[in-house]
Image (spheres, rainbow, N blue to C red):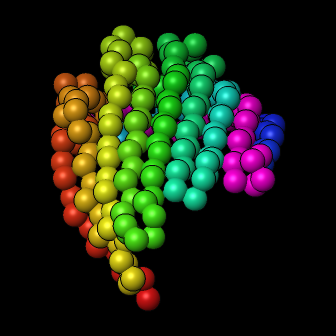
């Protein structure tokens, strides 16, 4: 069972757009992996009922021909409604709050350069279905400079510029192991258009 109610509106003579949506999702009788046998076979159990509801907000605005900003925010409340001893708990790896904001600036035609950045926030999450271990929230910062060519684009991109250590994902079957987020990195990409 799924409901979604949303609204979208353009503004600033069509150069801006905002959206808002409320969703409510209920799923029943979900077969899910809950463990592994000594022989390596999956142990499957039935989640009787799981629900999530929340709010999504987004903005995209071309302020002028050179400057663009965009952002989004989501609030999610996910719960096991009927699942053994986990009733009322939040599924692993689900953050209640997630947000992004980005911006870019494109210089005049005589300077074929575009600069941009993105900030991403992911709130606290649980690392298991029992909700006994919390993963810390994290924020990352990316930035780029792109040289705009006649037949393509040359982009120098820096990811996780603050070199923030964070846990991106946890597999509930290996509680002593986590997937760490990528450290600071730099990449150079050429995209051609035909």
The residue at the point 42 percent across, 29 percent down is 121
Write down the quadrant of residue 55 in the picture: top right
Where does the N terminus fall, quadrant-wise?
top right
Stretch of the chain drawn in magenta: 11-40
Is 50 displayed left or right of 193 in the figure? Answer: right
Front residue of 130 and 133? 133
**Residue 157 can be seen, yes or no:** yes
Q: Is residue 154 above or below residue 101?
A: below
Where does the C terminus fall, quadrant-wise?
bottom left
Front residue of 93 and 21? 21
**Residue 32 can be seen, yes or no:** no
Write down the quadrant of residue 29 in the picture: top right
Magenta-span inclusion, residue 100: no
Residue 127, how many percent across, how many down? 35, 23
The residue at the point 40 percent across, 71 percent down is 110
Residue 11, how many percent across, how many down? 77, 46
Is 168 displayed left or right of 72 in the figure? Answer: left
């Amino acid at each position: 069972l799924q409901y979604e109610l949303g609204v979208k509106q353009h503004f600033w003579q069509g150069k801006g757009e905002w959206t808002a949506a409320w969703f409510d999702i209920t799923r029943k009788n979900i077969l899910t992996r809950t463990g592994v046998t000594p022989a390596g076979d999956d142990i499957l159990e039935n989640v009787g009922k799981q629900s999530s509801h929340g709010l999504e907000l987004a903005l995209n605005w071309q302020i002028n021909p050179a400057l663009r900003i965009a952002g989004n925010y989501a609030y999610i409340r996910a719960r096991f409604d009927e699942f053994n001893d986990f009733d009322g708990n939040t599924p692993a790896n689900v953050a209640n709050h997630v947000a992004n904001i980005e911006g870019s600036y494109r210089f005049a035609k005589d300077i074929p350069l575009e600069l941009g950045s993105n900030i991403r926030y992911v709130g606290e999450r649980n690392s298991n279905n029992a909700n006994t271990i919390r993963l810390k929230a994290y924020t990352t910062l990316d930035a780029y400079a792109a040289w705009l060519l006649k037949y393509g684009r040359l982009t120098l991109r820096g990811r996780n510029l603050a070199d923030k250590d964070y846990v991106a994902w946890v597999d509930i079957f290996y509680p002593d192991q986590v997937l760490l987020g990528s450290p600071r990195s730099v990449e150079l990409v050429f995209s051609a258009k035909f």
